[in-house]
Every structure is written in structure tokens, then in C-alpha cells.
Amino acid sequence: MRVTVHHALVVPALLAACGTAPKVKVIEAVPVATIGAQQEWALVVQVHNPNATQLVLDNWVFNADGRRIEWVATRTVPPRETVQESLPVVLPASVGAWTVSGELFYVAPGRLNDILFDSGFSRPSVPFAGEPAIKAAGSAPTPTAVDGTMPDLKPPVR
């Protein structure tokens, strides 16, 4: 069998598919601010990393009530843990319940996958969809730091 450039590209792409994809669940939407005829929401989603190594999230691409939104994830999910993300969404203020569907792009675990991702040969993603529960204003969860820890809410010592 003759190995071609096509084979050289397909084999690494198949290797990158190894591992388990993260699981994404749409939880809720919390109104943040009303600006004229627009309503800003915090869309809360959960991301579970089933792998034994950390998972680097790259970006979110999703539709909320027919509007396309792209958001950079810049988040690492520790091994076998679940984190919450709060994604900004702006919709007409007149919208009541709404649906979300899209993809979360991530870097599959492993050094080879890092290289394939950085070179553009492998862009794994996982689809997600749901209808967020609409919550009262001011009930958005406290965001977590990039390393997954809770922010320090104590005032600085002087």
C-alpha cells in the first residue's frame, strides 16, 4: 500500500478522536440588564470533563433564539470535574422562553492533539442544546476563576 499525503493527514485526525468528549448541559438563563429594547442574559451551562487529564476549552458557537453567538472559552476543566460557565446573550426584551443549540470546541487531551489543534488539523467539538430555565434577575451563579477555584470575596488586607 502506498502512503499518500491524504493518509498522513487522516491517521493523526483519527488518533485525535481518541478520548471522551466533554458533556455540556444547558442549565438556566438569568436576566442581567435591559438596554432599550434588548435584554442581556447570563446563559449558565455545565461542562463535565470525563477524562483523567485536564481539558482545554477553546470556544463556544451557538444560536440563542435564532441569533448566532461566538464566545471564546479560555477555560481549563480539571480531570473528572464539572464546572459552570456563564455565557452572555443579548435578545429582544420581548422574548420569553427561548432555546439554545450549538457546539463547544475543545482541545482533545494529549500532546499530539495539542499539535493537531494548533496546526488546524483537528478541531473537536461537542454539540449541545436545550431550553434554559428562566431565573429571576440577580440570581446568576458566582463565576469561577480560570483554574476552577472560587474567587476570593474577602476585602484586601491593608
Image (tube, rainbow, N blue to C red):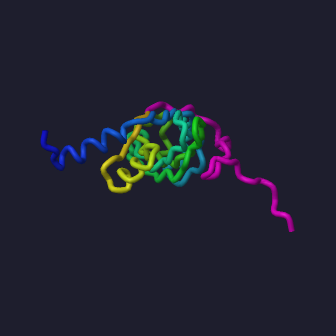
The quadrant of the image that shows the N terminus is top left
**Which residue, as the protein is rendered here, is positioned at the far bottom?**
158
**Percent position of residue 47, x then y:** 54, 38
- Say which of 20 and 42 sits in front: 20
Image-quadrant location for residue 86: top right
Q: Is residue 34 above or below residue 125?
A: below
Residue at coordinates 45% horizontally, 50% vertically from top-left?
58
Q: Position of residue 91 (x, y in %)?
A: 47, 46
Question: Residue 157: which quarter of the image?
Answer: bottom right
Magenta-drawn segment: 129-158
The residue located at (30%, 50%) in the rendering is 121
Q: Residue 30's x, y, as percent?
A: 59, 41
The residue lying at 50 percent from left, 48 percent from top is 56
Q: Is residue 76 left or right of residue 5?
A: right
* For residue 153, side relative to residue 119 (left or right): right
Could you say where residue 103 lies in the image, as x and y percent from the top left?
40, 40
Say which of 68 and 51 sits in front.
51
Which residue is found at the position 54% from the left and 54% from the top? 35
Is residue 47 located in the magenta-colored stretch of the structure?
no
70 versus 156 height, above or below: above
Magenta segment main secondary structure: loop
Residue at the front extreme?
1
- How many callouts does the rendering have? 0
Image side of residue 127 versus residue 84, left or right? left
Q: Quadrant of residue 2?
A: top left
Q: Residue furthest left?
A: 2
